[in-house]
Image (spheres, rainbow, N blue to C red):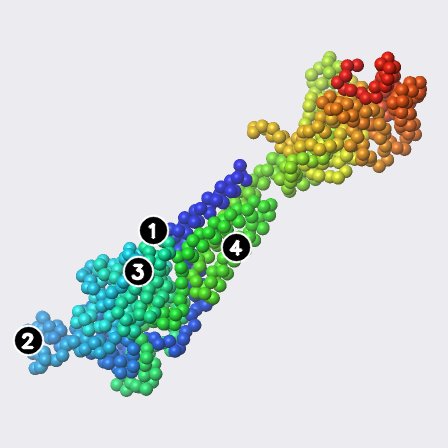
Amino acid sequence: MLRRATWISGLAVTATLLILYIISPPPVELVRNAVQDGYQRLSPRVYDRDAPVHVIDIDEASLETLGQWPWPRTYLAALTDRLFGLGAVAIGFDILLAEPDRTSPRALRENLTRFREDIRLPEGLSALADHDAIFARALSQGPTVLALSGRDGGVVPPPKAGVAFTGADPADALLTFPGALLPVPELGEAAAGLGHVSLTPGRDGITRRVPMAARLGDQTYPSLSAELLRVAQGAGSHILRTTQASGEGAGGSNLVVAMKTGAAQYPLDASGDFHVHFAGLQPGRTTPILSILADDWDTVANQAAIAGKIVLIGSSAQALFDIRTTPLSDKVPGVMIHAEVLEQVIAGTFLNRPDWTVGLELLVIAAIGLIMILLSRTDAPALGLLGAFGLAGLSWAVGWHAFSAYGLLLDPTGPILAAFAVFIPTTALNVLAKEVARRKIRGQFAHFLPEPLIAEIVQSPEETLTPKGAERELTIMFVDMRRFSTLTEKMAPEDVVRLLNTFLDGISVALVSHGATIDKYIGDAVMAFWNAPVAREDHAVQAQLAIFAIERAVADANATFQDANLPQVEARIGVNTGKAFVGLMGSSERLSYSCVGDAVTLAARLEGLTRLYGVGHLVGSATASACPEGYMHVEIDEVVVKGRTQPEAVAVLVSASDPAAQAFKSKMATLRVAEKAADWTAARAACDQIAQMQLSGLDLPHLARFYLERIADAEVKGGPDMLYRADAKR
């Protein structure tokens, strides 16, 4: 169940990450922005000193020299005249001029006389020209753009140049304000264009994008930089390309894809924002306003900086409150951001995040989630951790390469989060599942297997407890106490338990010491097998050596029984080798590690046949093919056990160095040959000789009587019956 939980938890975490990626809550957005800010710092845009964009800065020194803001509009008029005189292509004012000039003669007269009727103003003051009118005339001399800003209310007039759409109006996708803060009507009419300067920093206060179009009231306005591009080219309007008209999918929504202004076309994100690739503050981009307005202004030097360029006028002074934070700096004048946009659009180098990137990133998140689930299910948590770091690093590297080489904004945060977020719970559950399984395995096999074998199983339970195909060659042994019912019939229950436990304990130790897996205890019997769960090539040899270890354990038990005045016992052993199915078996409520198959059945039959031949053990022919060093097999008979049609040669294992064993093997061979040849005289003679022999663990007189009875039966039937049939009545 815990192993299944790794899949469930891994898939659940992956699904959660996909949902979080789509809805992009603040924490996810902050991480995403932090990564892309890192890209910007590692690879800022290379500034082109020949870029046709220049900034006139109203800096602190200008305010100290020319006085506090706002200045008389005549200053701005003079600035405009001089800039056009220096060859400026277009001029944009990143300054909100929403109120009439208070220094105009008419405004000055109203201010001076509002609360003082005794003030006498100079003659001709009212005849002086209005400052806004002077500035308006300067604006009308060439392509100029004034700033407006979104706000809560106010009537918004139509823009100077419309914003057309290829498809339906994507107003719902754009930055939207109920109204706008407009320039003084006289100035707005004189300017060639109006553009909004509403920058939208992220939740962390960092400006990374510039809305190139915004919905102000019921009108769509271009940004200051977009409008400057238009008037500089003499273009008539802007065109927003949307998903509806481009054939790109947007899930039923109509989102922005790109914008076209004159000959310039540039990609936008779904909300109409331009992703800025910052070059940072550049001295060559800026000229202080005093250099233009000073009485001794240098026409030649300024002409080199201004001629043929789009000029932006803004302020770096703290008092004018237009200081922004970008990925490269925390003190950037807002006008510089507009300049950065213009430089990129004119150069045709962009940061782009096409619509297909979202689908690609979702696919990568899902793929990494699945990979991490698979890695977490291995036996090496370090491999999963290495995989998490590797996939996270690869995601970052791919994102970095896409950014630096192609200007593509691929978001690696989702894949990075997926690598670690899936790794942690799935690995924890998998480790827990394995620990539970290890404890269960130890509990299940602690009394049946030696510690080294248990350790091997714990290391790879899938391979050992469920071998491939569940079929393996096993050597199976059945050990039973001879005449158990007769021995215990009149014994006290506590003596029966003592007798049985001592007998089984000794046998169990002997089996485990030779690498056996004890399958089960069946009353006074024990079933064991070799070569599973841990494979070993010498399983048949070890099983046969265990026969003598069991005989010694029974002898030790009998010594204990004699001291306790308990009866002596004997063990009967059947051993066979063959293919069997092995693994966890049982019901859903109770499982045990066991084996089944014809080879198992034959081993049980051989144990039962030992009493027939008067021997302590019998081994099948497959087991006898592997003989332990120093021993030899003596074939006793060929039998057809119940449920089988083919005969099986059965043998006993004896010491090869024992002269009596050599003599027994020779006489047994003589007996078998004589019986098959129906030479009853020779067969009886061999039986008489075998009956006179003595070998440990073999009741040879009993064996001789068995053959003499069979010989007599064969004589009556007129021919030899060379096979003992276990299902025949005798």
Measured as percent of width and height from the top left, residue 112 is found at 11, 74
The answer to which of marks 4 and 2 sits earlier in the sequence is 2
In the picture of the structure, the residue carrying the numbered disc 3 is 166
The label nearer to you, 1 versus 2, is 1
In the picture of the structure, the residue carrying the numbered disc 1 is 252
The answer to which of marks 3 and 1 sits earlier in the sequence is 3
Circle 1 SS class:
loop
Identify the mark at residue 118; answer none if there is no mark: 2
Nearest to the observer: residue 701 or residue 507: 701
The reply to whether the C-beta atoms of the residues labelled 3 and 2 are less than 8 Å apart is no
The label nearer to you, 3 versus 1, is 3
In three-dimensional space, the C-alpha distance between marks 3 and 2, rounded to whole angstroms, equals 64 Å
Nearest to the observer: residue 27 or residue 572: 572
Residue found 89% across the figure and 20% down from its top:
678
In the picture of the structure, the residue carrying the numbered disc 4 is 391
The reply to whether the C-beta atoms of the residues labelled 1 and 2 are less than 8 Å apart is no
The reply to whether the C-beta atoms of the residues labelled 4 and 3 are less than 8 Å apart is no
